[in-house]
Image (cartoon, rainbow, N blue to C red):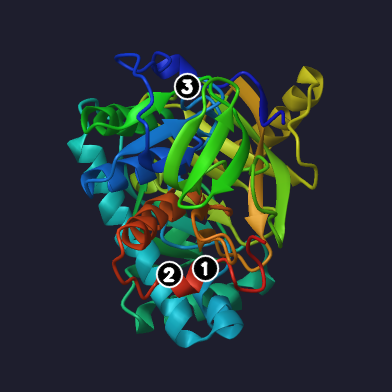
């Protein structure tokens, strides 16, 4: 599957990742993980820290899949607002899921601080503005709900928005405690830390088939076979070797990265920006001073091959960000398209296969994928080490939309 195309920015900020040493597979692993992106690397780290013997496989250079196209906005808020999620799955589970996302922000920061190389993890607020006047009531309802359950946030009216930004909107929700990150540097750092803890890394290794053999799995790849007591699929938006996703849509989005902007003083705390309409525009700054803008989602699974189409969409994104920040002299330095996954119920797929007890999944579909990867790695750690985890039911695969 062609998951991204165009000129990617993050690979220009770091070297391609390679394992320190070549290793020979063990006769038996506790867990083999398939996919070495955000979900796979964080899961490998969590399992290694729990004392398990882990192998991590990827058919590409590690981190060169969806991670290289990830825009690195980290938020505890979700594509579905909390008050809407309460209506969908009930108060207890909805609030707990939001709490898990909020806690995952702190866990991501702890991981980032533990890495040998700084992944440019910076705490930021997030501004979700009303795309049109009719959306104000929805934002106010979400503000009241978040306040009720002690999530840090504020509501801004038109004048308050204008005092902090170079644009005016009818209303906006400001959530606190979010962050930005260079996702490729972050994943590379996590991979190196996991490797130092004994995780065996195998790039350029594609899983072809997985066969259940009594008390273990025979994992057949493009190279040698691997044997493991359990397997975890962290394959992102690509098809899993075993299991069928139910209730997942794979779409594509467009991103442009601007030239360096020297003065961002009229961008309040360089907040992450998004909006209420769907599909939504989203924007952030980065440490270098560039502006990253995404959106224009399309209901097509693969990134387009046409550079002309990608540039046309990037010019549309450039126009939209200029409308918000007209004083900036902006141009397009990088432009690309990438696949992304969404679940119909707006929840990730995390847990054990309903009928295959050695098969586990962490598929963080939605605009909060990195946060889902973090919280999912802890759920899988508990499941695979025999620890009770009461939160696993919220995202488990036996719900209406999951893996079959």
Picture layout, residue 323 above or below residue 286: below
Residue 37 visible within the image: no
Residue 258, horizontal then vertical, whole percent: 54, 25
| Label 1 neighbour load within 10 Å: few <14, some 14-19, many 20+ | many
- What is the distance, in whole Å, between disc 3 and disc 2 at their CAs? 30 Å
- Residue shown at 35%/81% (left/top)? 149
**Quadrant in which residue 143 is drawn:** bottom left
Asked whether 295 or 112 is in front, the reply is 112
- Residue shown at 50%/33% (left/top)? 67
| Label 2 neighbour load within 10 Å: few <14, some 14-19, many 20+ | some
**Quadrant in which residue 372 is drawn:** bottom left
Q: Compare marks 3 and 1 and give the one earlier in the sequence.
A: 3
Q: Compare marks 3 and 2 and give the one earlier in the sequence.
A: 3
Marks 1 and 2 in Cβ contact (< 8 Å): yes
**Mark 3 highlights which residue?**
203
**Mark 2 highlights which residue?**
392
Picture layout, residue 19 above or below residue 252: above
Residue 21, horizontal then vertical, whole percent: 30, 14
Label placed on residue 396: 1
Q: Is residue 110 left or right of residue 392?
A: left
* Mark 2: secondary structure: helix
- What is the distance, in whole Å, between disc 1 and disc 2 at their CAs? 6 Å
Residue 116, horizontal then vertical, whole percent: 20, 27
- Residue shown at 64%/69% (left/top)? 345
Q: Is residue 14 left or right of residue 322?
A: left
Residue 314, horizontal then vertical, whole percent: 69, 29
């Amino acid at each position: 599957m062609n998951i991204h195309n165009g000129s990617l920015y993050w690979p220009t900020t770091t070297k391609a990742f390679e394992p320190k040493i070549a290793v020979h597979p063990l006769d038996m692993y506790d867990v083999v993980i398939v996919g070495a992106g955000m979900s796979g690397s964080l899961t490998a780290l969590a399992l290694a820290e729990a004392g398990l013997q882990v192998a991590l496989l990827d058919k590409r250079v590690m981190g060169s899949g969806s991670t290289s196209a990830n825009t690195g906005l980290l938020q505890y808020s979700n594509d579905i607002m909390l008050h809407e999620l309460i209506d969908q799955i009930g108060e207890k589970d909805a609030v707990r899921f939001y709490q898990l996302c909020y806690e995952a922000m702190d866990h991501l920061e702890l991981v980032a601080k533990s890495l040998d190389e700084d992944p440019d993890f910076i705490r930021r607020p997030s501004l979700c503005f009303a795309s049109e006047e009719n959306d104000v009531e929805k934002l106010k309802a979400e503000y009241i709900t978040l306040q009720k359950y002690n999530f840090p946030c504020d509501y801004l009216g038109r004048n308050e928005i204008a005092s902090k930004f170079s644009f005016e909107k009818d209303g906006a929700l400001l959530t606190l405690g979010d962050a930005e990150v260079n996702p490729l540097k972050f994943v590379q750092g996590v991979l190196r830390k996991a490797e130092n803890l004994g995780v065996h890394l195998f790039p350029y290794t594609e899983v072809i088939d997985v066969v259940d053999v009594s008390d273990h799995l025979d994992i057949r790849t493009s190279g040698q076979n691997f044997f493991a007591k359990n397997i975890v699929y962290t394959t992102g938006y690509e098809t899993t070797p075993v299991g069928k996703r139910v209730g997942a849509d794979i779409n594509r989005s467009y991103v442009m990265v601007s030239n360096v902007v020297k003065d961002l003083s009229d961008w309040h705390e360089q907040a992450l920006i998004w909006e209420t309409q769907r599909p939504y525009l989203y924007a952030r700054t980065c440490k270098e001073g560039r502006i990253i803008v995404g959106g224009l989602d399309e209901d097509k699974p693969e990134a387009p091959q046409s550079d002309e189409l990608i540039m046309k969409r990037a010019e549309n994104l450039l126009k939209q960000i200029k409308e918000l920040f007209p004083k900036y002299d902006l141009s397009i330095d990088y432009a690309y398209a990438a696949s992304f996954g969404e679940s119909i119920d707006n929840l990730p797929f995390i847990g054990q296969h309903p009928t295959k007890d050695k098969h586990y999944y962490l598929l963080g579909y939605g605009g909060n994928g990195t946060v889902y990867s973090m919280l999912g790695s802890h759920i899988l750690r508990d499941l695979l080490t025999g620890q009770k985890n009461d939160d696993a039911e919220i995202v488990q695969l036996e719900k209406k939309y999951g893996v079959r």
